[in-house]
Amino acid sequence: MCCESKRRFLLLYATQKGQAKAIAEEIRQQAGAHGLEADMHCISEMDKYDLETEKDPVVIVISTTGTGDPPDTARKFVKKIQDKTLPPYHFAHLQYGLLGLGDSEYMFFCNGGRTVDRRLQELGAQHFYDTGLADDCVGLELVVDPWIDGLWRALKEALQLQKEKEGMSSAVDAVSSSLSAASHAVHELKLSAEVKNLKLEDEEARGSVILSQNLDDIHLVTPARDTGPSLVHSVPPLSQSALNIPALPPEYIEVEFQGTQGENPHLSSLISEGTTFEVPVREAVQLTREDAIKTALLLELDIADTAFEYQPGDAFYVMCPNNISEVEELLHILGLSERGDDFICVKVKQGTKKKGASRPQHIPERSTLKFILTWCLEIRAIPKKAFLRALVECTREAGEKRRLQELCSRQGASDYTCFIRDSNVCLLDLLHAFPSCKPSLSLLIEHLPKLQARSYSASSSNLYQPGRLRFVFNVVEFPAGPSRPVSRKGVCTGWLAELVAPLLHPSKNSLDTKGESSSTEKISIFPRPNNAFHLPADPSVPFIMVGPGTGISPFIGFLQHRQKLREQHTDWEFGETWLFFGCRHRDRDYLFKQLQDFLENGTLTHLKVCFSRDSSTAEVAPPKYVQDVLRLCAKEVARVLLKEKGYFYICG
């Protein structure tokens, strides 16, 4: 196709945390090598494309968020195509291929992609390429890589059929004959997330490089006999293989240091979801005993002087910074310890070969270096293979360079999964493991994703406690291991625990702790309404709640709200309520012993609890887990759900 202009296809992505966008950018980058040009847009930019008149093939990459929802960026699109007045032939002209991203650990696997795929089919759209469903539980690349490899042939066949169709004189004959030809010509690609069903055609892969090196020229650390592979070294056959590695991503960002004069942007400018609220932490309570396996904290925020609104069942986001010690450590490794407070200007590199290059939206045009590393970039993110490929070029020592090449290669896919992905390795871990790797600041800005706000369920009712917002969380712990030299706490939970340490009252375990703290600590939050996880609109409808561990959190808000409604509306009819709660030990992590109060005042009809690690001397062992208690109550649960049309809520 060197003598022809490149053929266009429309490339749409819908992303929540940047994963789908990164894959779409990879598709756009590879397209040129196949004589194609991707017209790429976020699916929310509906003013820049029109599926109702689109003639070229469409490729859609879409993730899943929440409990099987399409990402926030796809909400308007999904609402538009779900219009029930649209006729079944609305998209009869449309040819598309869809790649869905999901996680099989969640019940509604890839439901964001499935929802769009199903609706497009209902509206008459035709597949030119089989749908791919990638599973983050085992590694997205196991499906993504071969799906992209097969995409080019399918696209060219679809474009050829389109060209033939355009040359026909009769529109009716054109549609009929093209669909017939398409069904015969398009090659089916059966994709499975299971490695055993996957066949990688390495030799035919385009947009990647076959790398063959003389291993005698590389000084490799020879492992002891019978030592298996690790993050820093491999074993045969991988250590002796020629490698198929990704093409080097083009550089597109440049950074200019501008001294120390200026002011950092407000945190609210870093989000696109609306207004942020800076609110004081009014109270903090440790709900677990010191010897509990996990530490659970309850925080109460003062929202009285804000316009923040929520209902029981809603979640909200907390904006959190990276750990300051890790930021300082990263600055030290980059050789920029003395320049953390310098302002930098981030802009697109002149002459970059990256198509459609722009400054990432989560990076301010001008701020201090420390601000970017603290509030903008997810420095704990698991490095993608494209990032590893770029780091190869920043690594001097030949053995380290080779190992990074292996980890980003097709042949090293299982090593990548084991030592990078499953080990939760981050950039700092890599820089410690490969000390000759010295990336530039611009490379980090290009490859590190946006630092995401963390979502928590409200554990209170504004009706019960006006002007107060409570939430409960476990302080996440990542122990040290072979690939991670030090233990770490969760980015947000670790920061919150440190922030409220002076306020903690370990002896208190109460829903209604008295006394206010004099804390001046504030955190920034913004709402995330949940349209599905609310109390029944009709209070006479019974409902069942299952909340093991901190999963009980939203149900405290449910019960507080229900108690207040019962007090205010004595003439209303209220349905029965069930709560199934489980934890390890009754005396260590029974988070809310005051559930008994709800039981006694009639707000809660049935309370069923179980403790998985407590020993028992009873002749018949008590149930250990909530599912065991549910089985014991099977007839009653069936009655509530089937006969009385009750609601069933689960949070874990």
Image: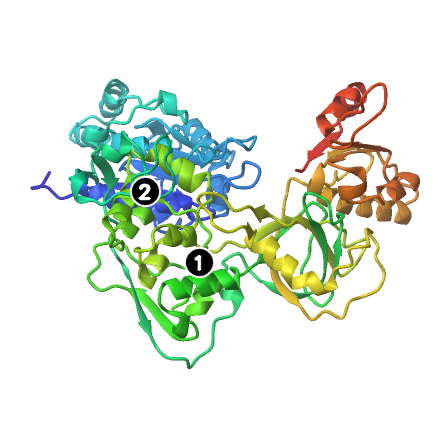
Secondary structure beneath disc 2?
Answer: strand
Q: Position of residue 356 (x, y in %)?
A: 27, 54
The image shows residue 564, relative to residue 62, as above or below, that is below
Q: Is residue 505 toward the left or the right of residue 143 in the image?
A: right
Of labels 2 and 1, the one closer to you = 1
Q: Which residue is mark 1?
A: 377
Secondary structure beneath disc 1?
Answer: loop
Q: Is residue 570 toward the left or the right of residue 397 in the image?
A: right
Q: How many marks?
A: 2
Q: Position of residue 338 (x, y in %)?
A: 40, 74
Visible residue check, residue 642: no
| Image quadrant where one finds the N terminus | top left
| Image quadrant where one finds the C terminus | top right
Task: Say which label, 2 or 1, has the lower sequence index.
Answer: 2
Q: The residue under label 2 is which amino acid type?
A: Leu
The image shows residue 334, relative to residue 378, as above or below, that is below
Q: Give the quarter of the image for residue 491.
A: bottom right
Query: 83 or 212: nearer the eye?
Result: 212
Q: Give the quarter of the image for residue 418.
A: top left
Q: Is residue 94 toward the left or the right of residue 566 in the image?
A: left
Q: Residues within 10 Å of mark 1 (few under 14, many from 20)?
A: many
Visible residue check, residue 21: yes
Q: Is residue 281 toward the left or the right of residue 525 in the image?
A: right
Q: Residue at x 37, y 21 (%)?
A: 196
